[in-house]
Structure formats: structure tokens, C-alpha cells
Image: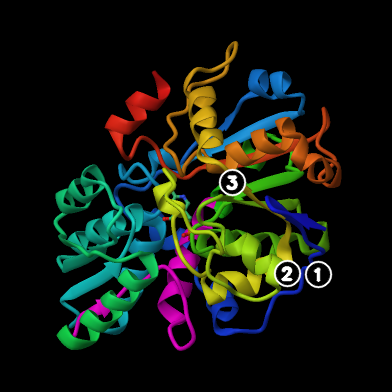
Amino acid sequence: MSNKSFYINQPDFILPGNTTVSILKEKDALGFHRSLEEYQPTPLIPLPDLAQQLGVGMVYVKDESKRFGLNAFKGLGASFAIHQIIQENPQVEVFCTATDGNHGKAVAWAAKKFGKKSVVFVPSDTTLNRIKAIEKEGATVIQLNKNYDDTCAHAEEASKLNNWELVQDTAWEGYETIPALIMAGYLTHFREMENEVHTLGLPEVDVVFLQVGVGSWAGAAAFYYMQRYGSQSPLLVTVEPEGSSGLLDSFKKQERTIPENPAHTIMAGLSCGIPSISGWSLLKNAVSIAVSIPDERATEAMRLLYHPKGKDQRVISGESGAAGFAGLLAILQDSRFEPVKKHLRLGPQSRILVFNTEGDTDQERFKRIIS
Ligand SMILES: Cc1ncc(COP(=O)(O)O)c(C=O)c1O
């Protein structure tokens, strides 16, 4: 069932047999990340008072704003992929990528860490603050008068011409290995939660909200839950901005497609084009619900997380970081999502996991939104 803002899928929970899945099965990124001096598991924060106000059993937030001092989760993927590339080919001198923010910062940080250079291309709508944040990590940043997909194509061309190593966080036919290494890096925070869930004696969760740009991160989550739980997986819900809903549109068409009604969104990290081929191969088999939300839901979610209820802890969450939680708000509060709420059986017994995938990565805008 679908309408403009959601699609209800019937996942079969079958892991596809492709290069990406082989790499995800084989690689141990957690072991690598633990060897880094900056490494610390990020916190898993329960918000019982907020959950009570929303009429659900519990909301847990895995807070990736605390990752490696980078204010976003993306360092997990870039560091692992760059490490693996250098192991294979220590001669690589320059890493290149296209990004709308956090991935570029992560590539710059990881390249610098291994004594290498980086060149980062950004699309026309990337804000100056985000560009400065990437430059601060030592990258040469070049803004193009192009959208995200065309910026990716440009980065690929430039890498071929200049003999740079392209570290792109989205996959297309013939370019799957490096995106899979990035996805393998993302698995670290799911593995961390296994330990945390056990050591804190916390219960497992029923519904997991995953915000989607190109779908590499959510694809890694899909792999994790399918491999670990099979058909007993928690229900997975993907969340995209209304102005960039390539995954939702792909579900509706039942094939990978560019967003049908692209429009500007403040959720910069989620403002992408066609979903990753590897992300799509996993998500279509694992996701129960795909939704798209307006920007106002993201700002509402940021404010709710910043101004906690009762004894709950404050969470600093940026526009894309809050998008998963914003999806939960939309489903609970907007009657258009009634069939989705029913399908997910959201109620006082539901234990919900969301990820704060970035903190205040654009601090000026963050201050305006939460005040
Ligand atoms: C903060 C944040 N959250 C989520 C995502 C989505 O990740 P993906 O593009 O792999 O779907 C991004 C992507 O850049 C991001 O920056």
C-alpha cells in the first residue's frame, strides 16, 4: 500500500548474493575502529519521558554526534575504507569524493590521519559553514554549480584524470567495492549496541528508524538486521525529506529511480539523487515502511531533542541527524500516516530505536532552529 508520503513493503529478509554482502560478511571494522586512539563507543540514550509523552514504550537514541569528534557518524565509513585501500595500495596519495557535507569532512579527516591529501567536490546547495568544516580537516574543497548526482559524476571523472582514489559513499554498476567498505565501517555502531544492550541489560527494540540519503548507511543497517535476526528482525522504517525521496520513489516504482519531485531541503545530508545500487539491493528486502517528511518535522524533532522532557537527557541533533526521529513524530501525529502506524503497531509497548546521525554540523542554523 502507498500514498504520496509512504510505502508499505512486504520484505522477504533474503540477503542478496552480491559483492557488497560478501564484503559486509567478511570485514571486521569494529576491530579496526577500536585500534584508533579517538575511538570510543557512542552513547545509547534512553528517553523515557519523551516516550511517555508520545505514547510509546521507549525511545532510544544512538548518539553519533559524539563520533571521533566529527559531530556525525560518517567517519566510521571513510576511516575504514581508506585504511583498507592503503593496506592494498600504500602508493595512493590523494583521496577524492563528492559530498553534501559529512562524508567529505570524514574523508578529509581520515586522509589526513593516514598522511594523505584529499579533494572534495560539493554541489551548489552546500552551505558555506559546511564547506569550511571540510576545509578545516585539511581538504581542498571545490564547489560546483551542479546537483548531487552530477557532482558525483564529476568527482569520478576528476579522479580518473588525476589518478586520485575515489572514495564515494554511493555505489553504481562497476563501482561497488569501495562503497561496500564504507558500509562495512558503518556496521561498527550496530555491533557496539550489541554489547551495550547486553551490558546495560536493555531490551531489544521493535522498530528502527533509518534516515536515508543514498541509502548506504540504511543499507548497512538492513544487512545487519537481516543477518542477525532474519525474519525476526525489528521492523525497519526509512525516512527521507519530501524534496529528496529517491528510495520511497524507488519502492513505488519497484526499481531504482531518481527522486520524482526534487526540491530544496534543510536536511542537507539526505539531499541526494538516485539510491545506491548496493543500498537498494539490501533495503528492498528488509524495509517494512518507507516515508517522506517535510522539513518542519525535522526542526520539530531537533527542538524536542534539545529541550528534553522531565529527567531525559538533552540530545544535540542536526537537520539530517534528527530525521529518523522526525519520521516517528510524523507517523504518530499526522493522520495521513494512520495505516503506517497500524502496520508498525506503534503503542505503549513499542521500543523504538533512532539514530542521531549528526549533531549541530551547521551551528548558525542550529541555533536559529532551537531558539
Ligand atoms: C547526518 C546524516 N545522516 C544520514 C545520512 C544518510 O546516509 P546515506 O547517504 O548513506 O543514506 C547522511 C549522509 O550524508 C548524513 O550526513
Q: Amino acid at mark 1?
A: Asp
Q: Is residue 26 visible?
A: no
> Which residue is at a point 54% across and 23% down the rendered structure image?
304
Q: Residues within 10 Å of mark 1 (few under 14, many from 20)?
A: some
350 with respect to 194 (left or right): right
Question: Residue lying furthest top in this view?
Answer: 310
Instruction: For label 2, count other residues whose C-alpha is less than 10 Å away and answer few (under 14), some (14-19) or many (20+).
Output: some
The quarter of the rendered structure image containing the C terminus is top left
Residue type indicated by callout 2: Asn
Quarter holding residue 103: bottom left
- How far apart marks 1 and 2 lie (CA) works out to 5 Å
User: Can residue 166 be found in the magenta stretch?
Assistant: yes
Could you tell whether 77 is left or right of 137 in the image?
right
Position in image of residue 264 (x %, y %): 42, 50
Which mark's residue is nearer the viewer, 2 or 3? Answer: 2
The span picked out in magenta is 163-189
Q: Which residue is mark 3?
A: 193
Q: Nearer the viewer, residue 151 or 203?
A: 151
The percent position of residue 191, horizontal first and vertical second, equals 57, 54
Residue for badge 1: 12
Task: Determine the image quadrant of residue 8.
Answer: bottom right
